[in-house]
C-alpha cells in the first residue's frame, strides 16, 4: 500500500474506485486507520466504501498516529489533521474533492472545509462524534494515560505499547502515540527521553484543546455559520455520537441536508443510496 510524506509525517493511503474524488476521514477515534471503513461498527454493516467506490475515487488513509502512518511528538490538533488531509490531496494532484467523515472524522472534514472551502465540493458527515459524555470519556482517557506515565515513566509506556496490539481508544494507558511507538524505534527513543513535564504539557494541551466543548469538536460555530459548502448530516445515537451533535451541525451549517432517520433504519440498502443521492446532487450544483 502506498505512503506519502505529508507535513513531515509518513501517511499510508489507498485509492479505490473511479469517478470524482472523495477524501474519506476514517472513524475509530485515535485508531483511525483506513481499514476502519470496512471493519468498524456501522460502517462495516453498511458496506459504504465498496458502494461509494462504484461511483467515486475514494481516498482513504491512516490518520497521523494511527494505523501504519507516522507521527510526531507535539501537541495534537485539528489543524494538524487538516494539514494531513490537504497534503494528501496535493500529493495526489487533486484540486477539489468531496469529503466524508465518519465518527470523529467529521470534525476533521468540517475543519478542512473551513480552512480551504474552495477545495471542497461537498461533505458527508456520518454519525458525528460529540456530546457531553463523549467529551468526558476523552478526558478520562488522557487522565488514565498520564497516571500510568507518572507511575511507570515514558519507557514504561513504550514497553506497554509494544506488549499489546491495542491502541489508545481501547487501552488508554498506552497513549495517543502507541501505534508509532510500535513501528518506529527512533521515535520510541525520542519519546522515552522526553522531559516528563514537557510531555505532560503536550498531553494535557492535546486533551483540553481537542475536546473543548460538549458538542462536535474541532471547528468554531461562527466559522460553520459562514461556510457555504453543502453538507449531508447523518445522526448517530449513542454516548459517543450524540444526536445533539448532529443537530448542532444542522443548526450551524447554512447549506445542509439532515437525514432524520434512526440508526436502526440506516441500512445497507438505504444509507449508501442516500449518500450517493446527495453527492450526485452536489455534483450537479457544482457544475
Image: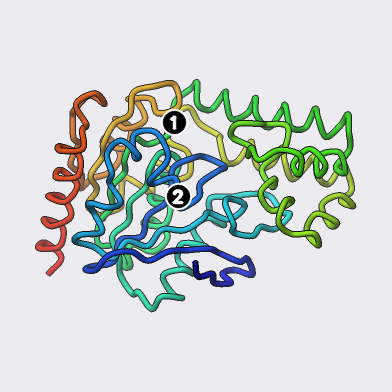
Residue 30: image x %, image y %? 57, 42
Image quarter where the C terminus lies is bottom left
| Quadrant of res 171 | top right
**Above or below 92: residue 264:** above
- What residue appears at the point 42 percent right and 64 percent down from the top-left corner? 14
Q: Locate residue 253, reporting x and y percent.
A: 27, 43
Left or right: residue 246 compared with residue 230: right
Q: CA distance from mark 1 to mark 2?
A: 22 Å
Extreme residue toward the bottom, this view? 93
Please state if 158 lies on the left or on the right of 29 as rendered. right
For label 1, the crowd category at 10 Å Cα-Cα, with few meaning under 14, some 14 to 19 and many 20 or more, is many
- Crowd band around label 2 with a 10 angstrom C-alpha radius: few (<14), some (14–19), many (20+): some
Residues tagged 1 and 2 counted as in contact (Cβ below 8 A): no
Secondary structure at badge 1 equals loop
Q: Quadrant of residue 279?
A: bottom left
Residue 170 image-quadrant placement: top right
The residue that label 2 is drawn on is: 35
Q: Which residue is mark 1?
A: 130
- Percent x, y for residue 76? 63, 49
Up-down: is 246 above or below 39? above
Eye-nearest disc, 1 or 2: 2
Q: Is residue 50 left or right of residue 215?
A: left
Q: Residue at left 15%, top 62%? A: 283
- Comparing 71 with 258, the one in front is 71
Residue at the (66%, 57%) spot, across then down: 71
The residue under the point 15% across, 65% down is: 286
- Spot occupied by residue 169 in the image (x, y as percentages of width and height): 59, 34
Q: Could you tell which of marks 1 and 2 lies nearer the N-terminus?
A: 2
Amino acid at each position: 500500500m502506498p505512503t506519502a510524506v505529508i507535513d513531515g509525517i509518513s501517511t499510508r493511503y489507498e485509492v479505490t474506485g473511479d469517478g470524482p474524488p472523495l477524501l474519506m476521514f476514517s472513524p475509530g477515534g485515535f485508531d483511525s486507520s483506513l481499514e476502519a471503513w470496512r471493519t468498524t461498527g456501522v460502517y462495516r454493516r453498511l458496506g459504504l466504501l465498496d458502494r461509494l467506490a462504484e461511483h467515486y475515487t475514494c481516498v482513504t488513509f491512516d490518520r497521523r498516529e494511527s494505523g501504519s502512518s507516522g507521527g510526531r511528538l507535539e501537541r495534537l490538533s485539528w489543524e494538524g489533521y487538516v494539514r494531513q488531509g490537504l497534503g494528501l490531496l496535493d500529493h495526489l494532484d487533486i484540486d477539489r474533492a468531496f469529503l466524508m467523515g465518519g465518527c470523529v472524522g467529521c470534525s476533521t472534514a468540517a475543519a478542512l472545509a473551513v480552512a480551504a472551502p474552495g477545495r471542497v465540493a461537498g461533505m458527508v458527515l456520518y454519525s458525528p462524534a460529540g456530546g457531553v459524555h463523549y467529551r468526558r470519556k476523552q478526558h478520562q482517557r488522557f487522565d488514565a494515560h498520564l497516571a500510568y506515565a507518572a507511575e511507570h515513566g515514558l519507557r514504561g509506556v513504550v514497553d506497554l505499547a509494544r506488549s499489546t496490539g491495542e491502541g489508545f481508544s481501547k487501552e488508554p494507558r498506552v497513549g495517543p502515540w502507541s501505534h508509532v511507538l510500535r513501528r518506529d524505534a527512533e521515535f520510541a527513543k525520542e519519546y522515552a527521553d522526553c522531559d516528563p513535564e514537557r510531555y505532560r504539557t503536550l498531553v494535557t494541551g492535546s486533551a483540553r484543546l481537542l475536546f473543548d466543548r460538549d458538542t462536535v469538536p474541532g471547528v468554531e460555530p461562527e466559522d460553520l455559520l459562514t461556510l457555504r459548502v453543502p453538507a449531508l448530516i447523518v445522526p448517530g445515537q449513542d454516548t459517543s455520537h450524540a444526536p445533539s451533535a448532529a443537530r448542532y451541525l444542522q443548526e450551524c451549517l447554512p447549506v445542509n441536508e439532515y437525514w432524520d432517520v434512526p440508526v436502526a433504519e440506516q441500512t445497507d440498502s438505504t444509507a449508501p443510496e442516500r449518500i450517493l443521492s446527495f453527492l450526485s446532487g452536489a455534483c450537479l450544483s457544482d457544475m
